[in-house]
Amino acid sequence: MNFDISLYLVTDRPLSKGRSHEYIVERAVKGGVTMVQLREKDISTREFYELALSLKKALEGTNVPLIINDRLDIALAVDADGLHIGQSDMPYEVARRLLGKDKIIGLSVETIEQAREANELDVDYIGLSPVFDTNTKSDINTPLGLAGIREIAGFTKHQTVAIGGINTSNTADIIANGADGIAVVSAIVSHDDPEAASAELSAIINKQKQSTCS
Amino acid sequence: MNFDISLYLVTDRPLSKGRSHEYIVERAVKGGVTMVQLREKDISTREFYELALSLKKALEGTNVPLIINDRLDIALAVDADGLHIGQSDMPYEVARRLLGKDKIIGLSVETIEQAREANELDVDYIGLSPVFDTNTKSDINTPLGLAGIREIAGFTKHQTVAIGGINTSNTADIIANGADGIAVVSAIVSHDDPEAASAELSAIINKQKQSTCS
């Protein structure tokens, strides 16, 4: 499945200031978000399933893929476009076997070594996590930093999306160091105007990609 | 798939006194347990998957089905014999569509009304939960009591297994009131001798079933 990983929104209800995922995602897509990941923790399976169904409906007709974090059962149940797994989630090979070759599967890598190991897998993209310090994930390793992004981008065969502490002030640097895209949480979901926030990030990415190519 | 629901062990690591699921399950099966459910909360998907794989291996050749609680992804990943869902888990119809008709699917019902609704579904069994007060589940409703068991057994078209606060002192009453089996947690997993505990429960069930039939 073709996808554009340049501006990847990861949901977070506690950071969304009481606004629904649909509210934020519809505006973010208008602003230029190219992929959406539904990430939920501490929620019942039924609630996760219902949120995924709603979000799928909100994305219908947009060409923006819906990716489910961790939960293959939810991805299958709503026929999502893909699954994002971390190092403590389902093994990649099992996820691929159950989802089939047409779905997008992304894998988080937290170290250079894990990025090298991912070169042995036919994942569709790798998430470089975290680039910077962040408050939105509690289980993080030492940040990879821009140097880590640059090193991984130099050898990986996969598309890369950087995540962790990314906002308008550092987006251009991340793209300049070789990431194919950025994934953001609070920079969009906590912003008073998710559409404007997305549009601003999108413009920075596009500008930097043009300058890198020229 | 044929199964015998008469003595159904539900795992619980915090109650297992540091002993592994394999340790307990191997002994419990020797003692007469007829089904095993792997129930895990607050665990990574990878750990859940690995526990399920180990337990599947421990049950190989025993004819005792391995049922996974809540997580359809884990059930699929290890090709378990079935899935047990509660009222806040995946909707039954979705689970059946993804698991296929050959797998066992059980559904917890917590009220008479839910038991009536379950008559519209082709679930393989219903769990009557809880029969008595219990400390092993935190999200419980008012206990159904023996009267609730008797009422549900009178109208349900499904096999029934009672759960919640069951031990050697009340097992006979539960079977006498019409349940096809009992599900236990601490009565086996916290017992110093899981094989002896299972054998004692099994003997009570068999004796009561014979007396009911004669």
Image: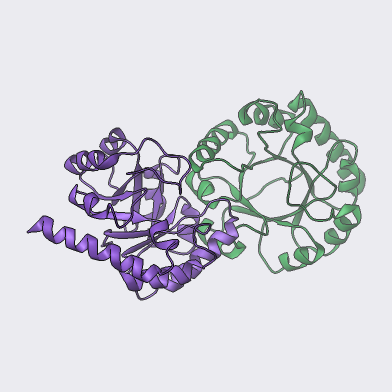
Chain colours: A purple, B green
Q: Is residue B89 left or right of residue B165?
A: left
Judged from this view, the residue extending furthest toward the left is: A214
Judged from this view, the residue extending furthest toward the front is: A169
Q: Position of residue B186 (x, y in %)?
A: 76, 35
- The residue nearer to you, when weighing A133 against A184, is A133
Vertical arrangement, residue A130 with respect to residue B126, above or below: above
Is residue A129 visible to the viewer in this orientation of the structure? yes
Q: Quadrant of residue B197?
A: top right
Q: Position of residue A180 (x, y in %)?
A: 23, 53
Q: Residue at x 86, y 41 (%)?
A: B171
Q: Residue at x 80, y 61 (%)?
A: B111
Q: How many marks?
A: 0
Judged from this view, the residue extending furthest toward the top is: B192
Q: Quadrant of residue A168?
A: bottom left
- The residue nearer to you, when weighing B78 against A35, is A35
Q: Position of residue B214 (x, y in %)?
A: 92, 47
Q: Position of residue B83 (x, y in %)?
A: 60, 51
Vertical arrangement, residue A50 with respect to residue B83, above or below: below
Q: Is residue B155 left or right of residue A206?
A: right
- The residue nearer to you, when weighing A117 against B65, is A117
Q: Is residue A156 left or right of residue B175?
A: left
Q: Is residue A115 left or right of residue A92?
A: left
Is residue A59 visible to the viewer in this orientation of the structure? no
Vertical arrangement, residue A4 with respect to residue A161, above or below: below
